Amino acid sequence: MATIHKRTAKDGSIRYTVEIRLRGQPRQTATFKRLTDAKKWIQDTESAIRDGRHFKTIEAKKHTFADLADRYIKDVLPTKPKQELRQKMQIEWWKERMGVYLLSDITPALIVQYRDELAGGITYRGTQRSPATVVRYMAALSHAFTIAVNEWQWLEDSPVRKVKKPKEARGRVRFLDDDERRRLLDACKKSKNNWLYLCVTLSLSTGMRQGELMGLKWQDVNLKDEYIVLHETKNGERRRVPLSGHGLELLREHAKVRRLDTDLLFPGIKHKNKPIDLSDAFEYAVKRAEIEDFRWHDLRHCAASYLAMNGASLAEIAEILGHKTLQMVKRYAHLSDGHVSNVVASMNAKIFGEGAK
């Protein structure tokens, strides 16, 4: 129920004070110079209260983006330990630019302004930020606003939702041909690091990420049933990784000389409870093998590519690599074209007969 009280101010002008009382809701008041404005406010406010929008608007006028950023960093990021440091840096970048703004004043146009500033920025390496980097910054911002909308009720909607993200470049696919693979494995065998050959072989044969491989503990390895269980993965889900062939045999030999003072398969030399760092040894092996433009993560691309070329479906590759969707493995689709053609040919032969044209 709404009431309007007309009164005369000290300067002789007329004022209209409005009061809205709805059952179960706090009393709302406002003052206007014109009666038509007062009536419109009543109509809009009552509608917003019934729709659950009004009090979110009030909260948006109470809090700045700095409030949102600080609360998000304090309460939400600790629940994302793998991403905490990186996303804290990203949120603080937005806070430096939008911290003083009330949430009610942050518009898609304002975010576009800083998105473009971010895209034009220079990294510490002296290169321009890639579209992929901008997308990651915007994803962190989007999640912060989503939490503020859904859980804290500080906003009615996220302004990031209407902002277009840059288009990322097509995912990199760099895999070794037969000769490159042979040269790299030979260089790894000759390395002074006795574990490099084993680790590279396991990466090639399983598609495990470098962090997953280096973080392995002996309790995660089942040599009898020939599999590894990864408890800490990028997507947060446990994954079972099959072991077979040369990699399995090498790992069985490695188990015979395992260190007993640590659970890690590949402990560091100075710090037994931290994984060994094979970066320098790997880079030197790549250089000795005379291979261009190849990183450790590309070993994972090799595994996926070899699976595709040997007839594995995209769904099977996604399961082995630990991807929740097929989007990330579509980059390997062209490598299985021959297999797909054979499947189509087989289907047609069964339907129309071997001699069908």
Image (cartoon, helix red, strand yellow):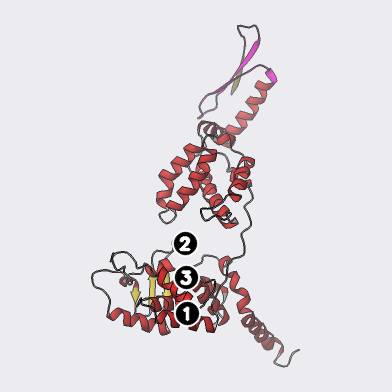
Please state which amino acid type lies under the numbered disc 2: Asn
Mark seen at residue 76: none
Secondary structure at numbered mark 3? loop
Residue at 49 percent of width and 37 percent of height: 66
Q: Which residue position is annotated with label 1?
A: 184
**Toward which corner of the image does residue 29 lie, by quadrant?**
top right
Residue 159 location (% of width, % of height): 60, 43
* Above/below status of 47 relative to 313: above
- Please tell me which residue is depicted at 45% across the width and 62% down the height of the picture: 234
Residue 224 sits above or below residue 300 on the image: below
For the N terminus, the quadrant is top right
Q: Amino acid at mark 3?
A: Trp
Q: Residues within 10 Å of mark 3 (few under 14, many from 20)?
A: some
Percent from the top left, x then y, of residue 357? 76, 89
Q: Residue at x 53, y 44 (%)?
A: 145
For marks 3 and 1, give the one nearer the viewer: 1
Gap between marks 3 and 1 measured at Cα = 12 Å
Task: Specify the segment rendered in magenta.
Answer: 7-36
> Residue at label 2?
235
Q: Are there few (<14), some (14-19), or many (20+) residues within 10 Å of tag 2?
A: few
Of 2 and 145, which appears nearest the observer? 145
Residue 257 location, x and y as percent? 27, 79
Asked if marks 3 and 1 touch (Cβ < 8 Å), the reply is no
Residue sticking out furthest to the left: 261
Residue for badge 3: 296
